[in-house]
Amino acid sequence: MSISKIQLEQEMKASERDEICYRLCDQGLVNFTREVTKINIAPLGKLLLDSKKAASSLTEEELKFLKATAKGAIAPGETGIDATYRQAVITDLVEEGLIEVVAQKIKEVWLTEKGKQFLCQEYSSQSTAKEISLKMLSDYLQLMRTNISPDYPKQEKNISSRLSDNKPTDSEILAVIRDLDHNLGTDNYLPIFHLREKLQPPLSQTELEQALYRLERSNKIELSSLQEVRSYTPEQIEAGIPQDIGGPLFFIITE
């Protein structure tokens, strides 16, 4: 979910919340994506900008981006680059060492499998509070039912789920990826927008992206960023998954 939807204790600051998120990630209990909020020109970028090679070695968008960051650290939106192309330009310039990421923020956060297991089997609260909300209790019970109930076989749950909402399992998503790659001839570099067109709906954007992350963590697929933006439309580029250095993950590679 979006980290902004996580309810804070009244006295807790957003920076403290983010620090907790980083610590939990270090323990492998949660994972998250980040969004670049400020960039600056790198020393190599300054050298290139001062040379006569800049106009010939950079695209028009990259040159405009580099000139904007030469004035000092700025937000990506202040570069004047269209939002559709902005993330891809940031990725290219960061990888080439021409700009630097100065600041970024946590965007989406979710429990890992280890985190779910910890909550179900190990967690013990030290709180002295006398009451909890029914919503908190309901969420915890749902977590228990989903992950550790021995009397409710996973196979039956999956069948029931597909009958009720027609949402594919991770294994079925992997099969769809392979079928699309074969049918479209994308040579094991399937653009994510093809999968979105196939599976959204029944899956939501967040559900599909989290399924892809699970498949990547289990070494079933690899997600790769886009290098050449000219080959795709703005809408197709926008269908990628935004990442911490600003560039979207765009291709799916099966292992």
Image (spheres, rainbow, N blue to C red):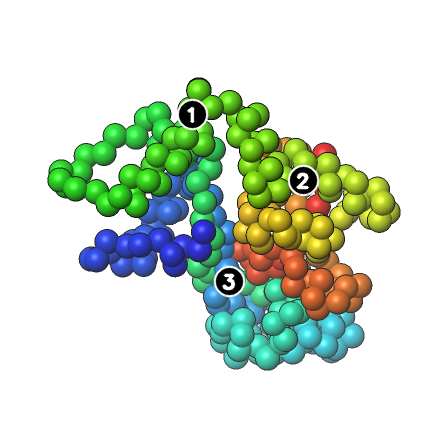
Which x, y percent locates residue 188? 79, 43
Which x, y percent locates residue 25? 42, 41
**From what the image shows, is residue 157 above or below residue 246?**
above
Q: Which residue position is annotated with label 1?
A: 148
In the image as oriented, which residue stretches furthest toward the top? 150
Do the CB atoms of the residues marked 1 and 2 lie less than 8 Å apart? Answer: no
* Structural crowding at the residue carrying mark 3, measured as other residues with C-alpha within 10 Å and reported as few (<14), some (14–19) or many (≥20): many
Q: Nearer the viewer, residue 178 or 143?
A: 143
**For marks 1 and 2 on the same chain, the one whose residue lies earlier in the sequence:** 1
Residue type of the residue flagged with mark 3: Val
**For marks 3 and 1 on the same chain, the one whose residue lies earlier in the sequence:** 3
Res 129 → quadrant: top left
Q: Quadrant of the C terminus?
A: top right
Residue 123 seen anywhere in this rendered image of the structure: yes
Pair 3/2: label in front: 2
Residue type of the residue flagged with mark 1: Ile
Residue 53 seen anywhere in this rendered image of the structure: no
Residue type of the residue flagged with mark 2: Ile
**For marks 3 and 2 on the same chain, the one whose residue lies earlier in the sequence:** 3
Which label number is shown at residue 173? 2
Q: Which residue position is annotated with label 3?
A: 36
Instruction: Identify the residue shown where x is 39% and y is 46%.
Output: 22
